[in-house]
């Protein structure tokens, strides 16, 4: 029995070392890029079909910014699946609800006092990172605390959401109240990919919108081969007078040439590097991960 146990341990150790060695080059690159980030870099990668993962500084709390629009969309679509809301449901939007910010709704309806469907709000929030649409949908589902309860209820504990977009805009420190870990976001990506939470119809819509997201084109999708299917949602903070940027993020599900999927979250918190450098770090990690996991 002792000999068999020893053999089993040796085999498992060999397999573990082999798996680690397979990603040693990728991990080394991420570590070097972390030194260049001038902040805190967190990465989590998973191939759902095989269970293969790579984690780098995953346990820290990373500021979400607009990445949180992905879990918000999940909750709204879940409530639509449950019959609590409807896609074609119209919400009356006052002029006071439309702040001058990143917002397609503000551009389309500057005078407000208009009925807007939940579907239009969802699409603008996901694909255009519309801050007004985000806050209107948060109000519809009864606030950030409800989103946090929903996400925690999915078994994800490393997720906190306390404030909306307008509240973050009003106070620099409040953005730090919305945090998570890269692995938590990858778990949500995997749940969407495998349709464990939402209906097929809702999953198709969410994945379509994430494929059509055109903001931050120089992050995850930037260095990938033309035509690669990328479903992503990014998040970006402002930069203060000292050159500090609390959040530069991108998360995505990438369809690999071998038919598998790469779920990836790259988050940079409290960085003093410039915009170009931070985005290049994310793009380089995504490219290296794509190449690492594209084999048979």
Image (cartoon, grey):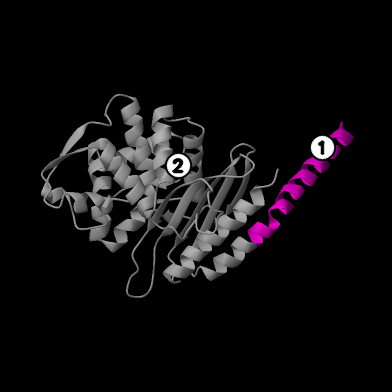
Q: Residue 191: which disc?
A: none
Residue at which label 1 appears: 8
Residue 222 pos. (x, y %): 50, 58
Crowd around label 1: few <14 · some 14–19 · many ≥20 (10 Å): few
Which residue occupies 66% across, 52% down?
Answer: 292
Q: Residue 157: which disc?
A: 2
In-front residue for pair 140/59: 140
Q: Main secondary structure of the magenta part?
A: helix
Q: From which residue to which does the magenta span run?
A: 1-28
- Horizontal relation, residue 141 to residue 153: left or right: left
SS of the residue at dot 2?
A: loop
Task: Tell me, yes or no, whether the two marked residues, 1 and 2, touch with CB atoms within 8 Å.
Answer: no
Q: Does the rendering let one see residue 199?
A: no
Residue 87 found in image quarter = top left
Which residue occupies 22% across, 43% down?
Answer: 136
Q: Is residue 228 above or below residue 244?
A: above
């Amino acid at each position: 029995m002792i000999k068999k146990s020893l053999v089993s341990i040796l085999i498992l150790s060999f397999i573990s070392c082999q798996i680690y060695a397979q990603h040693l080059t990728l991990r080394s690159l991420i570590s070097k890029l972390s030194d260049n980030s001038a902040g805190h870099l967190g990465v989590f990668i998973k191939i759902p079909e095989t269970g293969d993962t790579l984690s780098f500084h995953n346990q820290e709390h990373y500021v979400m910014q607009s990445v949180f629009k992905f879990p918000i969309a999940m909750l709204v679509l879940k409530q639509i699946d449950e019959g609590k809301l409807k896609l074609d449901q119209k919400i009356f939007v006052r002029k006071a609800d439309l702040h001058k910010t990143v917002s397609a709704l503000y551009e389309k309806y500057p005078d407000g006092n208009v009925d807007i469907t939940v579907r239009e709000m969802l699409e603008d929030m996901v694909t255009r990172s519309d801050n007004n649409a985000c806050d209107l949908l948060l109000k519809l589902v009864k606030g950030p605390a409800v989103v946090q309860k929903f996400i925690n209820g999915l078994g994800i504990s490393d997720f906190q959401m306390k404030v909306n977009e307008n509240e973050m805009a009003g106070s620099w420190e409040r953005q730090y109240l919305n945090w998570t870990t890269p692995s938590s976001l990858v778990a949500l990506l995997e749940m969407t990919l495998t349709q464990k939470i939402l209906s097929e119809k809702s999953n198709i819509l969410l994945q379509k919108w994430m494929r059509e997201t055109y903001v931050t084109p120089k992050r995850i999708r930037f260095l990938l081969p033309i035509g690669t299917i990328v479903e992503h949602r990014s998040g970006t903070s402002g930069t203060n007078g000292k050159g500090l940027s609390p959040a530069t993020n991108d998360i995505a599900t990438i369809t690999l040439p071998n038919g598998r999927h790469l779920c990836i979250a790259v988050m940079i918190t409290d960085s003093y590097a410039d915009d170009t450098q931070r985005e290049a770090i994310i793009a380089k990690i995504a490219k290296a991960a794509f190449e690492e996991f594209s084999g048979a």
